[in-house]
Image (cartoon, coloured by chain):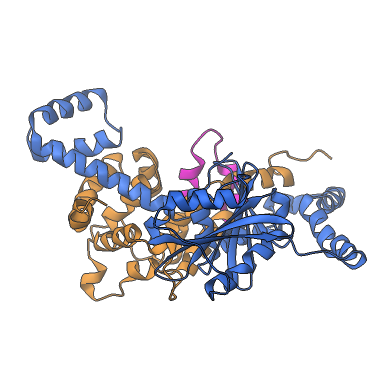
Chain colours: A blue, B orange
Amino acid sequence: MRCDEAQELITGLIDSELSSAERSTIEEHLRGCPNCRLGYRNERDLKQQLRTAASYLQAPVPLRQRVLGALPLAPPPEEEGQSFWDYLFSSVRALLRPAFVTALFVLFIVPALYLTRATAPPISLLVVETYGKIQRGEMQLVSSPNPEKLKEQLVQAVEGAFAPMGYDFSMINLKPTGALVRELAGRKMIAVVYQGKGPPLICYTFLGTEKDAPASASAFVDSENNMRFYIFTADAINAVMHREGDTICILASAMPAHELLALARAKARSA
Amino acid sequence: MARDPKGGVEEREKFGREVMDHLDHLYRIAFHLAKEQDQAQDLVQETFVRALNSRLQFTAGTNLKAWLTKILYNFFFDRYQEKKRWVSTDAENPAAQGEPNYWQTVASPNPGPEVSFLESELRTKISEALHKVPEEYRLPLLLVDMGDLSYAEAAEVLSCPIGTIRSRLSRGRKLMHKHLKGYLETGH
């Protein structure tokens, strides 16, 4: 077999799209041809690069919301010929749908609860509201050239109850430059500040549950990893919250919400 | 009166949830087909609505992702590229024609001062390289390498023989490697 004849078979081999006869032929050629072996490795690595690049690109949150919004609104064509009773039945069922009940809850019951009892802001909002103060230098950070030493100090400061997430954001040119521990709403939280080009990113951690998400947050379910992410905004800063065990993590940044979500999804570890 | 279980509201919503599982995939393909991010989002939303409305045409047990991709691809070309089918032998490079460098445009869907996640070095390099690859080679790369479709599924989407997918993938990857060569060799 000539090398030029081998090229398409190499492609098929990488994609596992060859018959057993084709596979035997190209594998025999590769054993005796260092140039084609190099070409095989290059092509295989390129395919991996393309897959990696693709995995970083995820549907933006506004698109998800638009699509979800289209789900109950788009009229099913099969219902055009339905009877009055079918129509009535489906209308009553629509009133019992979770989305309708949720809307009812949000429109009437939540305001009623709000008016009848004083409510404190959820800790997640209080936490993200520190972003501006940290950025303006109003909250003093501790830093150390040794990340492990810094982590040890932070864990000691919260009496060993939990630890910072220790995420690596070097792939977007952000590196940890400092951290602090504060008590908010009776709970201690750790904030680790990552800086580089562009706006800083702060990774907050504290002990809690998903109930700590603000009521206004949009929930995103990552079915692949069986995790939920909550997207919200505080003081014009986007935030994405998720839970890892009994620790809550919030990533906060001025970057677009859907990109922050993609970042959180890439780094989050399911419990 | 008994309701057709496949035409019911619950069935429709269930199917919609299954389609949602492929939203990232559809957006990736749309993002690399469309010239603007808004257009990509419109493509995905329209694909979603069309899929729901024609869900009875989907054969259970076949690949839903490939079926959705075909809807998206057909809609895109019906609406935006009526005169330009990839199966033509037109291998013109838009950049060489002095047309707008739209791969650079789509690589920055949220222009602003901030350095964003999607503008990472890898993404930028890939986008730049993809833009230099003629469309007939680029589409198999999007479907097979980035979309994880099989040759048969990609051939079904693009209405071409399976052998064409393999030969154009082979050529497309060589072009991509040529454009990314310096980048790949720096150990990224």
Q: Let me know if residue A114 appears in the view.
A: yes
Q: Is residue A19 left or right of residue B75?
A: left
Q: Let me know if residue B87 appears in the view.
A: no
The part of the chain drawn in magenta is: B50-69
Q: Is residue A243 left or right of residue A4?
A: right
The image position of residue B84, as x and y in percent, is 33, 63
Q: Nearer the viewer, residue A228 or A80?
A: A228
Instruction: Identify which residue is drawn at 81% across, 61% down.
Output: A106
Q: Nearer the viewer, residue A197 or A65?
A: A197
Q: Which quadrant of the figure contains the N terminus of chain B?
A: top right
The image position of residue B56, as x and y in percent, is 61, 43
Q: How many marks?
A: 0
The image position of residue A237, as x and y in percent, is 58, 69
Instruction: Identify which residue is drawn at 28% across, 63% down.
Output: B128
Q: Nearer the viewer, residue A123 or A93?
A: A123
Task: State whether residue A163 is above or below residue B128.
Answer: above
Would residue B132 be counted in the magenta stretch?
no
SS majority, magenta:
helix
The image position of residue B47, as x and y in percent, is 53, 56
Q: Is residue A120 left or right of residue A239?
A: right
Task: State whether residue B111 is above or below residue A83.
Answer: below
Would residue B63 be counted in the magenta stretch?
yes
Q: Is residue A190 left or right of residue A96?
A: left
